[in-house]
Amino acid sequence: MDNYFRALLKQKTLLILLSLVALFFIFDVLGIMGFVSDVTQKITTPIQISLYKSHNDIKGFLSVISEIGSLKQKETDLEYENSLLLAENASLKKLEVENKLLREQLGDKISGNKLIVASVIGQDPLFSVSRILISKGRNYGIEEGNFVILKNILIGKVSATHNSSSLVILLTDPESKIPAITSNGARGILEGEFGNRMSLKNVVQNETLQVGEIIFSSGEAEYPKGLVLGKIKSIDKNPSAIFQNAEVSPLVPFEDLETVFIMQKI
Amino acid sequence: MKELILFTILIVVASFIQVSILALPIGSFVVLFWFNINKTKHLIFFATLFSLVLAIISDLPVFLVLMSTTFTIGLFAALRSVLPSKNFIAYSLLVFSAISWEAFLVASLRLINL
């Protein structure tokens, strides 16, 4: 048996490390660490961006090679899905025009949002949480609680800001809970789960859920209404349970994101 | 001296990999690996370097990362002192302690509601 613990105590290593913890805590409170981080991040951010992008490129290349056999089938499926979406898009455009006219007639003031573009510079270093780091922070007016989107797809919410970067909590993080509604009107709560997964929970039994159905934010709990959250992958319906649940997959793979937009209220 | 430079580079690279490529506690594993071989020699330097680099590039509070690293070192030392000094046990302890580092850091982050 080796006495590692005695060595730690004898050399006062533990004591020194704990004193350093206290010292860094004081530095953090005084804002000294913020200053050090800002200066250092000017050098580290480009390295992080190139590492992150190179990793994504290599991953993409390898996945193409491994999936080459099933690409033909995928193409056929996508063509079919695309034609359905085109039809849906055409009818939505018509509705959009009608909606705009109605809003103008009713004198509705639509609250605007300013979009700030940011690069994804990395992920959270912890395996059990789903967060990403983006290249814009307080210097650009980013605040905690700002929503992060890609087109009309909600990616997550800013959970912490630094001067030149921000931490975004993704929809797949276990802490993320968003009031949601399906395209057929079934309401529930979209919750992130361990292992980069999402579930639509608390949907009452008499509501109808369908595989492939798109899920939107319902506009409650400070979340903007109508942002796309994901697509139903499978349904878990047990007649003896009060609620039914569904597994939801994101429309964009969060791990491959390179650019995102931050919604800033104006 | 060579070993010191090699581990310094290894810790910096491991921190970058952890943030940009693979979200596994690689950096804390490297620090513990050093501790397992060289005991307390330069341990403070490596633990602080790892905590500083990781905290800065991933926007985490340095004191929390260092606290988790200190906790992990303490845990590894305590278990290593009571368990038989066989290689298999030592390496299993390294993996276990690195996982504990992650668990402790996640718990502390939740606690301060970051």
Image (tube, rainbow, N blue to C red):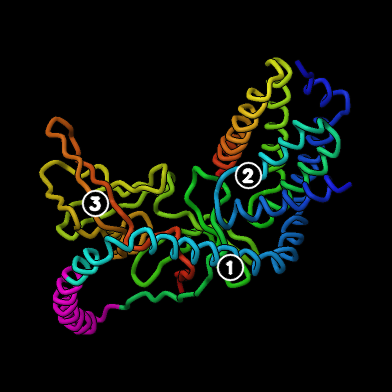
- Numbered disc 3: secondary structure: strand
**Discs 2/1, front:** 2
State which chain disc 3 sits on.
Answer: A
Residue A189 drawn above or below residue A141? above
**Discs 1/3, front:** 3
Residue drawn at x 34%, y 70% is A152
Q: Give the residue type that dot 3 points to.
A: Lys
Residue A161 drawn above or below residue B110? below
Few, some or many residues within 10 Å of mark 3 (<14, 14–19, 20+): some
Q: Give the residue type that dot 1 points to.
A: Ser
Judged left or right of residue A81, residue A128 is right
Residue bearing mark 1: A135
**Image position, residue A107 (x, y; %):** 25, 81
Residue drawn at x 65%, y 55% is B16
**Discs 3/2, front:** 2
Mark 3–mark 2 distance (CA, rounded to whole Å): 33 Å
Residue drawn at x 62%, y 63% is A48
Residue bearing mark 3: A233
- Numbered disc 1: secondary structure: loop
Q: Range of the magenta residues?
A: A80-108
Q: Is residue A95 magenta?
A: yes
Mark 1–mark 3 distance (CA, rounded to whole Å): 32 Å
**Image position, residue A193 (x, y; %):** 38, 43
Q: Give the residue type that dot 2 points to.
A: Ile
Disc sitting over residue B26 in the figure = 2
Residue B5 drawn above or below residue A44? above
Mark 2–mark 1 distance (CA, rounded to whole Å): 24 Å
Circles 2, 1 touching at the beta carbon (< 8 Å):
no
